[in-house]
Image (cartoon, grey):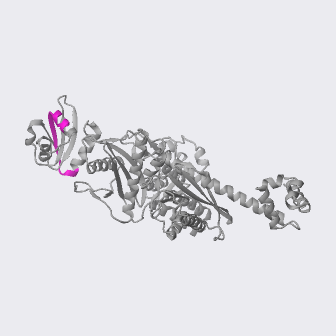
Amino acid sequence: MLTSSSFQASDYNSLPDLPGVYKYFNAEQELIYVGKAKSLKKRVSSYFVKGTGLNYKTRRMVKEIQKIEITIVENELDALLLENNLIKKTQPRYNILLKDDKTYPYLLLTKEPFPRIYPTRKLIPNRGTYFGPFASVKAMNNVLELIRSIFTIRTCRLDLSAENIQAKKFKICLEYHIGNCLGPCEGLQKEEDYLKEIEHAKHILKGNLGAAKTFLKKNMLEAAESLAFERAHYFKNKLDLLEKYQAKSLVANPSIQDLDVFGIESDEKSAYVNYLKVKNGAIIITKTVELKKRLDETEGELLLTAIIRLRDQFNSDAEEIIANIPLEEEFEGMNVTVPKIGDKKKLVELSLKNARYYRTEKLLSAGEVKDKKDRVIKQLQADLSLKEIPRHIECFDNSNIQGTNPVASMVCFLNGKPATKEYRHFHVKTVEGPNDFASMTEIVGRRYRRLLEEEKDLPNLIVIDGGKGQLSSAVEAMKELGIYGKVPVIGIAKRLEEIYFPEDQYPLHIDKKSESLRLLQKIRDEAHRFAITFHRQVRSKKAFNTTLTDIEGIGEATANKLLKHFKSVKKIKEADVESLAAVIGTDKAEKVFNTIQQKKSGD
């Protein structure tokens, strides 16, 4: 039970020694601050006792206080939750402000016969059960699309009461004919069967994919055992959709169940907090917010505010909370720990990376990073947490078609610009067949062995076009040369534009609109273009040499002599007999010329 009282500012000594929430009002009866305390008397008195070391902003607030209102609660955690609700509702001037003015999307499961599931931003009581909020519309649509792909849930707005169905008021629509609905409007699907599908859809909405997978697998096996192979295939396709969706989720260790992860990075004006919500081993929500400082709050105070507000906003009831710093106070019923090793530590590091990236983006958009010349590479340095500005970046890519003519490329960017004179091509020499991993190990090793032998500078950053496999192969070569750990190396996977670090289980996702990601994409695409171009040249040269050496009297030496003189296959094909004869003699020139013309006419 809550007890509220009002006091004049001068009566602060009369406050009880109990947990609760206090509110400060100025002379205009405007609420200027809300706080929580384990002991109202001790906490409020600390503002008014001289010599307590209050900062300038807090002293300025104290001068404005005319009235104090308190609310006594059962314990400190209750005080914390009540404080959060009051701040959200009233937004006092001196309280920490969480900069987030968005309204988040939800999925609503309606309370009606044959319930529907549809997106909304309005929370209207008694309309049904709301799931969310989702951090983005895209995330919400992905879940909704998955549910509609697996289950036959209606999308119409018809009032499917038993009376209306019995009276045959409705007709089946296109959704029925294309298999997205089983026609409950005409009584073709029993409500009991429909509600079973809704129950399984609810598991997915709650983030529990395991129950839905078990249901689909059971139906598939039962159909197969009864030799209903078409029906078994139907359930297999649904199961594949679910597993494909799950594969796209950022999955943590399956042994990690429900968990909230927080990473905080702060400066003089603000704190930036990233939140990862882990459910059943997968990260299902990620959100980063800015908290504006008002009274020079500590990182611990700012983190506590973010934990309470973000857990409230995203309806989290996870019992375990981990973060990169400890809280300054302990609260019964809320345990926050700082992991030292293992997967949980890696999750915290991932959260902190995202908080740091968000801070950099904010500073850039506010114009606080003014050095335009180095802006992008400095942003890249911050995003990747590099010790040095990556002025010299080298990127590697492989190219082969089913293992034929394997080649590779290395492109070089200096100060964010392509340095084409430093580009290099590689013929893969030690690998047979289509083995991109072994090819990557070879070319990275060859490149940096040569730089070390010639005592040339190593790059500030090595980029590998590919995911964890290609990155591990490059790391293997770097370890053999003793440069691993001296030069940072990352992999960039094209499908989701994920950035991988060696020995890091979880990728970094940089904002798709950021300049640093665009630079990495540009470097990666340039390496790919350079490798593909070289591969085409090699294939063309090999095919041309084969064509020539098939001619009686023309050997590999003659073919190479032509290439050396004309520089390209294209120019050889365009040459006349006289030009060819000047290099290889009349007899051979006529044979080559006639063969090329026949080939052209055949094409």
Q: Position of residue 170 (x, y in %)?
A: 55, 41
Q: Position of residue 362 (x, y in %)?
A: 40, 42
Could you say which is closer to the camera, residue 189 or residue 71?
71
Magenta residues? 59-77
Q: Is residue 111 visible?
A: no
Marks counted in the figure total 0
Could you say which is closer to the camera, residue 373 or residue 287?
373
Could you say which is closer to the camera, residue 72 or residue 239?
72
Q: What residue is rendered at 44% in x and 62% in y? A: 504
Position of 266 with respect to 435 (left or right) is left
Position of 200 with respect to 3 (left or right) is right
Position of 503 with respect to 1 (left or right) is right
Above or below: residue 390 compared with residue 444: above
Q: What residue is rendered at 88% in x and 58% in y? A: 581
Q: Position of residue 157 (x, y in %)?
A: 50, 40
Residue at the limit of the structure toward the front, as seen here: 455
Could you say which is closer to the camera, residue 381 or residue 28?
381
Q: Quadrant of the C terminus?
A: bottom right
Above or below: residue 77 compared with residue 65: below
Q: Is residue 305 magenta?
A: no
Quarter occupied by residue 557: bottom right
Q: Is residue 365 visible?
A: yes
Q: Position of residue 578 (x, y in %)?
A: 89, 54
Q: Is residue 61 magenta?
A: yes
